[in-house]
Image: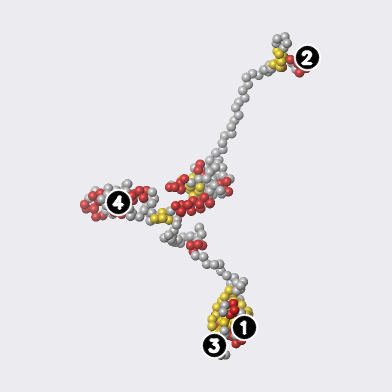
Amino acid sequence: MSAATTRSRTPDRLCAEAVDLAREAAEEAAFPGVVGEHVAAVAEGDRVVTHYFECKEMGYRGWRWAVTVARASRAKIVTLDETVLLPGSDALLAPEWVPWSERLRPGDMGPGDLLPTEAEDLRLEPGYSGEDEPPPNSVVSEAAYMESVASRVDEEDAEVVDRSAVPPARGSIASVAEELGMRRARVLSRYGLHVAADRWEESFGAKTPMAQAAPATCVSCAFMVPLTGSLSQAFGVCANEFGPADGHVVSLSYGCGGHSEAAVMPTPTRPAPLRLDSTAADPFTLRPDPEGGSVSLVDAGGAEDLGHS
């Protein structure tokens, strides 16, 4: 028999009449005065009934006290089964629980807080672990370098040589890894670099309103401090204390009104001086003269004279 069919049956008479017993159980579990009116009696099974009471406790709007009572077969005494506080159809519920790793947002960390990183974090990958060290007898091995350092120390001071304090030999794998910033347990993976680049581009990139209204981009700004590594091709750090991105990683295509060259106004171009070959009127030939000469505009003296010549 389904649960819907079970709950639709007629409640047991004796269990349905045990309202006072159910109220006493609810008031014992709750505080006095927070158990309200009797709402309903629902049959849970054979001789099993749940009584619902309103909950008047602050902060639990729409919740109901549910008290389940039952009696044995052929018994006339109703006994208490359980008492719980359940939400109703219009109950005020807390938001669904979200793990801390999913609800953590930038800026949530405070002094003393620790943010553990998962071992399989896709943003990270193993760095230089030293497993590919050259053999001890190799000329570039760290062991050979340490022995050469110890051999140059006086015999009375040989015992105080701290091998861990001596830097790795120049040209060894460890020194190259340290120079490249790879001598760490884990480093940023390619995915981690892309995620960081997308985040920085969204905050301080070319598509932001500030960059759209800027007179020039950060690539030509003196306040832009370039990064190292592969990110240096697209990002830098703003060092303008009056800029909106001071201390932040900005895209080279970003810009703001604090550009170092924004106040350097270009000098307006001056027109070239006017040059005149002569100050007199130049003669202009209108038509050939029948007598072998020519009639000019200056010689004619005017439009009327030209018409009679």
Real-space Cα distance between discs 1 and 2? 132 Å
288 to 102, vertically: above or below? above
Q: Position of residue 41 (x, y in %)?
A: 61, 81
Q: Amino acid at mark 1?
A: Thr
Who comes first in sequence, dot 3 or dot 2?
3
- Coloured how? secondary structure
Q: CA distance from mark 4 to mark 2?
A: 113 Å
Whole-angstrom CA distance, mark 4 to mark 1, is: 84 Å
Residue 98 visible (yes or no): yes
**Cβ atoms under marks 1 and 3 closer than 8 Å:** no
Q: Nearer the viewer, residue 5 or 84?
A: 5
- Quadrant containing the C terminus is top right
Left or right relative to 1: residue 113: left
User: Of label 1 and label 3, which has the lower sequence position?
Assistant: 1
Residue that protrudes farthest toward the front in the picture:
1
Is the residue marked by circle 1 packed among few (<14), some (14-19), or many (20+) residues within 10 Å?
Answer: some
What residue did someone put label 3 on?
72
Q: Disc 3 vs disc 4: which is toward the camera?
A: 3
Q: CA distance from mark 3 to mark 4?
A: 82 Å
